[in-house]
Amino acid sequence: MSEHQQQGFSRRDFVKIAAAAPLVGSIHSTSGAGRGAEQVLANGRASTPGGPEFFDAPTIRGKPLTGPIKVGVIGCGGRGTGAAVQAMTADQDVILHAMGDVFADRLESSLAGITGHFEDAGDEQGSARIQVPAERRFIGFDSYQKVIDSGVDVVLLTGYPHFRPEHLRAAVAAGKHVFAEKPVAVDSPGIRGVLESAAISRSKGLACLVGFCWRYHDGLRGVFDRINSPDGGGIGEVTSVHTTYHTDTLSKRPRKPEWSDMEFQLRNWWHFAWASGDHIVEQAIHSIDRLSWAMNDRLPLKVTCLGGRAARNGPEHGNVFDHFAAVYEYEGGLRAYHTCRQIDGCPNDNSDYVFGTKGQAVVNGWVPTLSLRDLRGKEFWKYTPAADISGRDMYQNEHNALFASLRAGTPINDLERGAHSTLMSIMARQAAYTGQVITWKQAMEGQERLGPERYEFGPYQAAPVAIPGRTKFV
Ligand SMILES: NC(=O)c1ccc[n+]([C@@H]2O[C@H](COP(=O)([O-])OP(=O)(O)OC[C@H]3O[C@@H](n4cnc5c(N)ncnc54)[C@H](O)[C@@H]3O)[C@@H](O)[C@H]2O)c1
């Protein structure tokens, strides 16, 4: 049994936790709901009462939102359901106004889950804020536009990563505030579009918070703030980082006779690189974002990445790899490493090892290990939560932060940073698929757009599994 299975954290459990998180958050969250004006620090960064500096996201100038805030969900799966409840828990005047999904069954089960959450909690006020009549339940590939046009103030973009750039573009064009799950794109053209949306959203004073939830985890904030402080919290200057996301394989939804190619691939989206970006982009991106966090969000110059498909085969496993090992190179010759694997029967690990001139940080949010050590490995500091924030949930934290920033008129907008972490993941996949060293510039200028040009249920042949050395970088 793997370490994570012993800990009770498999990939799908993680998703379940993500969906179930509000239960935890609503019990433990001290930053609470309906807190109109959160404290905004002079440096333009917002802080939340009950947990000073619990987030440190980039904020911009906007217009404070007053009164009810209408929210629409686009992509009603595990995260869409969780995010809707978290949004409604973050602020007592958030109304769930509209929902959209490609599939009716997903939308209805999500709505039932959200309804059940508030009913089980005996929260009549919460139940009354679910206002999604049949005419505001939109189904199909164009459902995102209908949600955006339904009179919402905020959209939660929780569909498949492939669609995120288009959903972001439409939301920002319509002047909507956004919560967007990671990753924000699956390919280079998508990233360029997202960077355009980032610039437009900033110019319009719109929030765009990307779901890199670990940046809102109290314990990780405690460690990474120290790593990024002048003496690295005692570990000195960072010389190297290794982050891991070693976990079990993905679940499968066997093909039903009535499913077209498109429906089969969408229902098994994490097996298809065009829909998910592959697991280094879809899942391990959390660890690549933390690698970047440890490097103080400097951009790498280039990446070399080995990868392949050792234990996956058959059509239900689509065309994704099952392991990657990336080496990022930075100015000055610094190197940072990321390894990820989705193979059963191997030890699991989801840790960040940050090496400095005087010591190291070892970070694992699940176990949890949040520790600073000297060069001999002796721990000299470990994170201990202040009593008033103990047990807070990172998913709830990020929504508390988002809605507090909207009320304060200083919307969080970290879309550009989210796009950079996404491109770091994409460039590693590009390097692994092609077998080439990929520079940041190449990745930024890449022309290959993954996936179909038109979205419709019918035949669709996904690309073959990439072969390093033969698959070309485009
Ligand atoms: N931050 C986290 O910890 C975390 C955890 C889980 C998932 N995620 C991310 O959230 C996103 C969703 O993951 P999930 O686990 O909820 O998947 P899911 O399959 O449970 O749900 C996704 C839903 O979106 C719908 N959808 C997809 N494309 C759509 C489109 N174009 N228009 C309308 N609806 C669309 C699907 O039909 C499905 O119901 C992914 O990007 C994933 O990486 C983040």
Image (cartoon, rainbow, N blue to C red):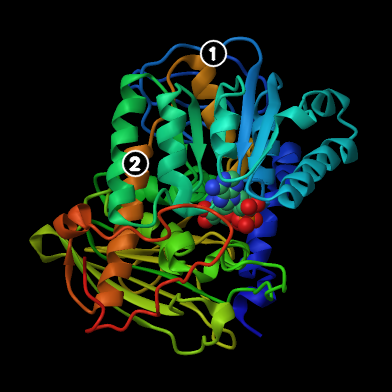
Q: Residues within 10 Å of mark 2 (few under 14, many from 20)?
A: many
Q: Position of residue 139 (x, y in %)?
A: 67, 42
The answer to which image quadrant residue 37 occupies is top right
Q: Residues within 10 Å of mark 1 (few under 14, many from 20)?
A: some
The structure residue drawn at horizontal position 31% and vertical position 21%, both measured from the top left corner, is 203
**What is the count of numbered marks?**
2
Towards the viewer: 82 or 314:
314
The answer to which image quadrant residue 200 occupies is top left
Give the secondary structure at mark 2. Answer: helix
Q: Is residue 137 above or below residue 3?
A: above
The structure residue drawn at horizontal position 61% and vertical position 78%, both measured from the top left corner, is 3
Determine whether label 1 and label 2 are within 8 Å by CB. Answer: no
Instruction: Give the quarter of the figure containing the C terminus.
Output: bottom left
CA distance separating discs 1 and 2: 25 Å
Q: Seen in the image, is 150 located left or right of residue 461?
A: right
Towards the viewer: 227 or 400:
400
Q: Is residue 371 visible?
A: no
Towards the viewer: 181 or 353:
181
- Residue that lies at the very extreme toward the front in this rendered image: 458
Q: Position of residue 343 (x, y in %)?
A: 53, 83
Q: Is residue 245 visible?
A: yes
Residue denoted by label 2: 194
- Residue that lies at the very extreme toward the left in this rendered image: 332
Amino acid on which disc 1 is placed: Leu
Residue denoted by label 1: 65
